[in-house]
Amino acid sequence: MKFLLSILKYLFVLTIMVLSIGPFIWVFISSFKTNAEILNYSIGWPQSFKISNYLMAFKIAPLTQFYLNSVIVGIFGTILNLIILGMSAYVIARFDFKGKKAIVGICSLSLLIPGAAMLQPLYLTVNTLGLYDKLIGLIIVYAGFGLPASLYIISSYFQTIPKEMEESASLDGAGFIRTFVSIILPIAKPGFGTAAVLQFLLCWNEFQFAITLTTGNKSRTLPLALYYFKSQFASDYGVMFAATVIVIIPSIIVYMLLQKQVVSGLAAGAVKG
């Protein structure tokens, strides 16, 4: 019976892996094929691995500009999000004050609001402030959109830190800022790492706000590049698959490099919660 259960577990894990990794492997292999090869035998290896589709993708669309825009928006949107959330999450996790439950409740409710419902008010606000079709507008929007999730992740991790450490620092004469910067922040790196990765992936992969708050190629990000290929070059499947790989590879690399911090941060918060 135990042997059968072990086999079923392995089969379940194998099925999840195939469903998760299989589509990406197929797209990656197809990005080296010609249109004829994709249409005639979609499952199989290309006759030769050529990078012509990738070179053509950069010629058809301004992917270099889109890449630069995505990197700027992803990095600064993540930094702004963590700067705003760092100390506020610590205060929420450690202190009781009037309105705390209201703040937490509002953050909880904001997670239930679909992004599409905020497109019109965001467009009007960004346009009124003169931030339409500017990277700074996307950075502010993404930083704000990721605040609730980051708040819960970071504050949950702060709750795993023993209060005795802060009390010892207070006895040694350290003030609030000194304790937070010198003691709490180094310990809470996994929590910040988790929030940073999820926020960066949000900035990198988001589509709705990007297409609504930008126009032209000057401020648009990589997800819109796929829309560019789909709308104008939908029949060139090899080039479209190459563009897809170009877009998703950086997010996979970021997650692989920081996966230990993501898992430890989420696990610590879940245990405490």
Image (cartoon, grey):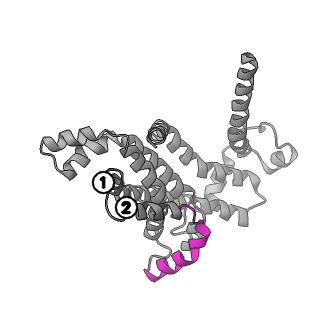
In the rendered image, the vertical position of residue 157 relative to residue 117, given as above or below? above
| In front of the other: 173 or 55 | 173
Q: Which residue is mark 2?
A: 100
In the picture provided, is 42 more to the left or to the right than 123? right
- The image position of residue 93, as x and y in percent, is 36, 51
Q: What is the magenta range?
A: 111-129
In the rendered image, the vertical position of residue 131 relative to residue 199, given as above or below? below
Q: Give the residue type at disc 1.
A: Phe
Question: How many numbered dots are placed on residues in this image?
Answer: 2
| In front of the other: 48 or 106 | 106
Quadrant where the N terminus sits is top right
Q: Residue at x 57, y 73 (%)?
A: 119
Disc 1 crowd, CA 10 A, few/some/many (<14, 14-19, 20+): few
Q: Give the residue type at disc 2.
A: Lys
In the picture provided, is 182 more to the left or to the right than 99? left
Q: Residue furthest bottom?
A: 128
| Main secondary structure of the magenta stretch | helix
Disc 2 crowd, CA 10 A, few/some/many (<14, 14-19, 20+): some
- The image position of residue 53, as x and y in percent, is 69, 50
Can residue 232 be seen at all in this image of the molecule?
no
Q: Verify CB contact (< 8 Å) between mark 1 and mark 2.
A: yes
Q: Secondary structure at mark 2?
A: helix
Q: Residue at x 80, y 51 (%)?
A: 35
In the rendered image, the vertical position of residue 270 relative to residue 139, given as above or below? above
Circle nearer the N terminus (1, 2)? 1
Q: Which residue is mark 1?
A: 95
Label 1 and label 2: CA atoms lie apart by 9 Å
- Examine the structure image and report whether residue 116 is included in the region drawn in magenta: yes
Q: Secondary structure at mark 1?
A: loop
